[in-house]
Amino acid sequence: ITEAEQAVLDEIEEKDVDFLRLQFTDILGTVKNVSVPARQAEKAFSEGIYFDGSSIEGFVRIQESDMRLVPDPDTFAILPWRQKEGSAAARMICDVYNTSTGEPFEGDPRRVLKNALERAEDLGYEVNAAPEPEFFLFEEDEEGRATTKTNDAGGYFDLAPKDLASDVRRDIIYGLEDMGFEIEASHHEVAEGQHEINFEYDDALATADNVATFRTVVRAIAAQHDLHATFMPKPIPKINGSGMHTHFSLFEDGENAFHDEDDEFNLSDEAHSFLAGILEHAPAITAVANPTVNSYKRLVPGYEAPVYVAWSDRNRSALIRKPAARTPAASRVELRSPDPSCNPYLAFAVMIHAGLDGIEKDLECPDPVRENIYEFDEQKREEYGIETLPSNLGEAVQALEEDEAIYSALGEHVAPKFVEAKSQEFEEYLVDVSQWELDRYLETF
Ligand code: GLN
Ligand code: MG
Ligand code: MG
Ligand code: MG
């Protein structure tokens, strides 16, 4: 038993934890739980906990359904909304192992991200990531089902009393802090009922774990206020959708390898090549970072979401922005396309592979675009060589299948399963008849 594991066992004792939720995610990014009595913690560390993986989305075929969960002691956290006098529940995020081979299970999204981080490590880099997840808080109806009615009428950075949701947001932040999050900032977003909470950067694995946890915490605490929190990218047409801008930097021997004092943008050659790699693979990344039919309702001009494959050190209509950095450690690139419906492990994995591909191939970075690209016409975009992101899930999945570097980044297990699930989702959508069509055509024809 390791020191970290012993620390967890001590804390279980000290805080009267009676149940442990062992968590992992499926290919779609949904958090799954196996609950075990806390006294099984030691066994979970030494032998793992066996479960039947055949019922988990995209995990295994029926005939090879036994999986083993091994908890990562660094992810131990008490669930703040489940605390009672003399009893508590805690969670740990697990790695999934194949029982027949004893090897890490390649269908585990956390494993897919670890593979990306190992590639970075082989090149001498540690990857840092920080997300800016946005979400809406909606009222529930009498039956407790989610509506799209917002419970406030605030706008960007509004304060109480207009920002009625600030109480909820405060409780969410306390909950996150109880679970070990370092919250950097939180504010009301542009749309009514829309919020954003930023947390401190960390290594990319911890950050992906944090995103998975974040969504659970936000939903659980909103529910305590009889509100429904949604990470659906575009719940309401014609107003801003919810994104999850993601910032990346690479550190080498404890120093930020993305920083260069002498560069016009304070970005090193590595940073420029990383950025070029993401631009090069942007269409395929989109399938993973924007994995729902609804994601593409957000990626349209005019709502601060990216549509065009370009980068900028100024404006926010580009896919990648170089935020102003106060210190060398803060030099980074911000990818603005991801939305919070993505599986953070898979999304970070493909973005990191794309960037590393740019570094390995020493890709040339194009010039930044400083004008508002939303206002460009097709001719001007052509002149600047600016491509457009896929405009629907079908196109994005096709781009993923055609991009060998990104497809293989998902691994042999996840890549075909992801493509299959998403193709099916898109086909179902295509044959559906929407309310918009009924409103438009039912009485006209
Ligand atoms: N909500 C916008 C998006 O869809 C971002 C707005 C912002 O953070 N400035 O990405
Ligand atoms: Mg922000
Ligand atoms: Mg924002
Ligand atoms: Mg941002």
Image (cartoon, rainbow, N blue to C red):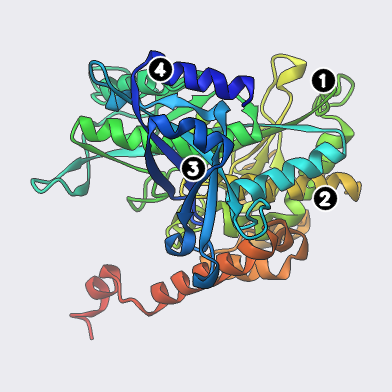
Sequence order check, earlier mark of 4 and 3 = 4
Secondary element at image label 2? helix
Q: Which residue is mark 2?
A: 357
Q: Name the residue type under label 2.
A: Asp
Query: Which disc is residue 440 wearing?
Result: none
The answer to whether the residues at label 1 and label 4 have Cβ atoms under 8 Å apart is no
Query: Distance from label 1 to label 2 (Cα)?
Result: 21 Å
The answer to which quarter of the image holds residue 221 is: top left
Q: Which residue is mark 1?
A: 255
Sequence order check, earlier mark of 1 and 2 = 1
Secondary element at image label 3? loop
The answer to whether the residues at label 1 and label 2 have Cβ atoms under 8 Å apart is no
Q: Nearer the viewer, mark 1 or mark 3?
A: 1
Disc 3 CB within 8 Å of nearest ligand 1 atom: yes
Q: Name the residue type under label 1.
A: Glu
Query: Which disc is residue 13 wearing?
Result: 4
Sequence order check, earlier mark of 2 and 4 = 4
Q: Name the residue type under label 3.
A: Gly
Q: Residue at x 47, y 74 (%)?
A: 424
Sequence order check, earlier mark of 1 and 4 = 4
Q: x, y percentage for residue 371? A: 67, 41
